[in-house]
Amino acid sequence: MISRLRILIFASCAILFSCKNEKKESENVAEVKTEEIQDLEGWDKAEAILKEIKIPQFQDKEFNVLDYGAVADGTTKNSEAFKKAIAACNEAGGGMVIVPSGKFLTGPIHLKSNVNLHLEEGAEVLFSKEKQDYLPVVHTSYEGVELMNYSPLIYAFEQENIAVTGKGTFNGQADNENWWPWCGAERYGHKEGTPQQKDDHNLPSLRKMNEEGTPVADRVFGEGHQLRPTFFESFSCENVLVQGVTFTNAPFWVIHPIKSNNITVDGVTVNSHGPNNDGCDPEYAKNVHIKNCLFNTGDDCIAIKSGRNNDGRRVNIPSENIIVEDCEMKDGHGGVVMGSEISAGVRNVFVRNCTMDSPNLDRAIRIKTNTLRGGFVDGVYVKNVKVGQVKEAMLKVNLHYGIYDNQDGEFFPEISNIYMEDVTVKNAGKYGILIAGREGSKVSNINLKNITIDGADTAEKITDADPVNYENVIINGEKM
């Protein structure tokens, strides 16, 4: 049997050197400083970003949760055992906390620096359905607005060198009886007259606090409120790895690195079809590498965010340097999405070598904002993407996005510099290309090259945007 030491060495080395083994867009990209990356062009920039991303390293020490009192029967609550094992690992300078094969029920897991929570094959972590287990409230975020709320199921705050790895499963146990009814939709179990997130003391109250600039410490929700927690959240963390594990039955967003740098999400499966079950939502995040993952979700597969309205402008940290490659997107509202919580802006997004295909996938690439959100998107690069079936469009840019009332304000978005090449689409749905800019805020510099789109009811619908630069683009058999 391979020793734990060999597993640790193999995992660390494989991640550290994987970028060197991949085919480079340019063989002459030199090591560059972070501030110089923006001066590079196209995919050379992506290669430089990959060299900047740091992978967490861990000592060769093990802490098995069974040694701290954990019981793998699926009914005994193991919150204290997980807490003790993580604390012991952290106090010893770090290492691997082992969760062996079996079913382990627990409350929220709070990670500490230099801890790798490792799920062995056959391990399933079941999260408690008792809401009080997620109290006291912690500093977190809901739809792009910071607040004090129920703890995320797996949470790290101001930590560094943390990881969840392995071949096991994290099961949030959210369903139409637990967490999901709070979204307010009947199809997710909500019953008329019972509390839900749109009640005045929930989202409307949080929205008002956002508008008025209420200090985050005073935005206290949690008990008596109905705002669901995220699944895995690293908040203000450095060097984060999520590798190999499966997430299912999430209450809300699944993987949410917020205000964090150097994030690697590798070989992860997200199979969760609840409300707002986005697969991975980097927010105010920098240097993010998402690779070899499968997203089968109830909302966006990947949604890049940077705060909602005043909160985003207050924090003012763009999400940038985000690379998505070798991933598969199935069900979801969009494959790779920017927005709608995007008020601090997004730059340098790279998507390559991905497949997107499902009758329940709405769009492949999507940008969504409005004049309340504002924000900017500068530099989206898409290459070698195969799209099977989507419902609405291969590319959708919408500066009129709004699922709530009163979505107009004074913050005009700026969307520019989109480059897509070597993309094939078998069934594009309603549109090949769908772009809705705004007067005074036109979408600019969209470049499409070597793209074939079939099955579109309408080839393109473009308003308030500069003319698209087409090069060898064929939609429904006709050259554009």
Image (cartoon, rainbow, N blue to C red):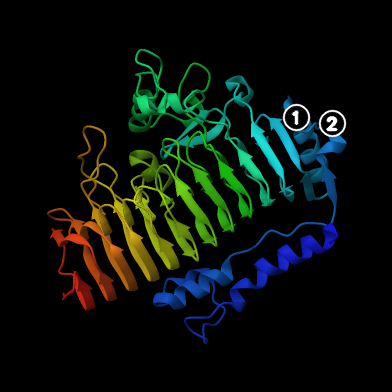
Counting residues from the N terminus, which is met first, the one under dot 1 or under dot 2? Answer: 2
Q: Residues within 10 Å of mark 2 (few under 14, many from 20)?
A: some
Q: Position of 153 compared to 80: left or right?
A: left
Q: Position of 203 compared to 157: left or right?
A: left
Name the foreground residue: 5 vs 189.
189
Name the foreground residue: 297 vs 380.
297
Type of amino acid under label 2 = Gly
Q: Which mark is residue 69?
A: 2
Name the foreground residue: 48 vs 11.
11
* CB-based contact (under 8 Å), mark 1 and mark 2: yes
In this view, 136 is above or below 454: above
Q: Residue at x 58, y 65 (%)?
A: 53
Q: Position of 479 compared to 380: left or right?
A: left
- Where is residue 337? Give x, y as percent: 37, 54
- Where is residue 160? Give x, y as percent: 67, 51
- Where is residue 336? Give x, y as percent: 39, 56
Instruction: Tell me where residue 12 sits by quadrant.
Output: bottom right
